[in-house]
Amino acid sequence: MARMDERRDPRDWVPKTELGRRVKSGQITNMSAALKTGLPVREPEIVDILLPNIEDDVIDVNMVQRMTDSGRRVRFRVTAVVGNRDGFVGIGQSRGKEVGPTIRKAIDAAKLNVVEVRRGSGSWQSGKGAPATSVPFKVRGKCGATEIILIPAPQGTGLATGAVPRQVLSLAGVVDVWAFARGQTKTTINFAKATLDALSATSRMRVRDDVKGRLGIREGALIG
């Protein structure tokens, strides 16, 4: 179940990067502007400040065992997803000896990989002025041998996909979509990353202003 990460107070943060200093000083007040600077997001506090309502969820916890000279060594690999359910989502991984700290590190890693997601009413079944509850157009995402195709769906369809993409899509703010996957879909991590890649494609593609209006395209939320 998604939850808020309240273990860190951004007010105590001393930024170490240029983007962090701009955010701390108030020069940048929303995540869209931060991403458009082209500066890398290297401090999770940037996301904590610009997306105060961000939630997190654990996608996968995998225990890895290895035999060493001193005996059996156990480590955990955690994959987490974060999102504000309104146009921003990210995925991160971490490895560690204990589950709790490793989960927190994976959540921070996911915040450093946050992307902006366009939403729209791109389905031919959606009437003019329909809410932006789906993806604006068909997009593809791939990671390793896993590929997913997201197709616009009308309001009320829901997330017609598997459990892993559903976690990513819901935290991104996509409510209605048809999805088709192929390849190694049982590989949880690749399936999640392929979904994120497809969502990232919504912002990478250039769209004319008249098409934006026709499809009701909405950029990521501007929270300041």
Image: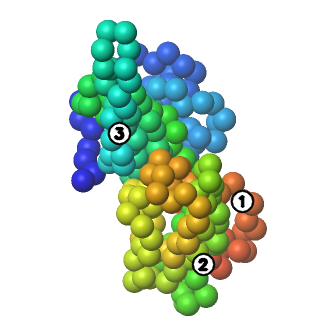
Nearer-the-camera pick, 20 or 164:
164
Residue in the image at 66% along x and 35% along y:
38
Does 29 sit above or below residue 73? below
Mark 2 lies on residue: 122
Callouts 3 and 2 close, C-beta under 8 Å: no
Residue at position x 48%, y 52% from top?
187
In primary-sequence order, the first of circles 2 and 1 is 2
3D distance between C-alphas at marks 3 and 2 = 37 Å
Left or right of 31, for residue 51:
left
71 relative position to 150: left or right: left
List x then y, in percent, for residue 71: 30, 14
Is residue 208 found left or right of 96 in the rendered image? right
Secondary structure beneath dot 2 equals loop
User: Are the two marked residues, 3 and 1, in contact with CB atoms closer than 8 angstroms?
Assistant: no
Q: Quadrant of residue 176?
A: bottom left
**First in sequence: mark 3 vs mark 2:** 3
For marks 3 and 1, the one nearer the N-term is 3
* Label drawn at residue 205: 1
What amino acid does circle 3 point to?
A: Asn
Q: Are marks 2 and 1 in contact (CB under 8 Å)?
A: no
Identify the amino acid type marked 1: Met
Q: Quadrant of residue 15?
A: top left
Q: Residues within 10 Å of mark 2 (few under 14, many from 20)?
A: many
Q: Amino acid at mark 2?
A: Gly
Crowding near pointer 1: few (<14 within 10 Å), some, many (20+)?
few
- Image coordinates of residue 161 in percent, x first then y, are 45, 71
Residue under pointer 3: 62
Residue 145, position as x, y percentages in the image: 62, 53
Examine the rendered structure and indicate whether residue 139 appears above or below residue 15. Answer: below
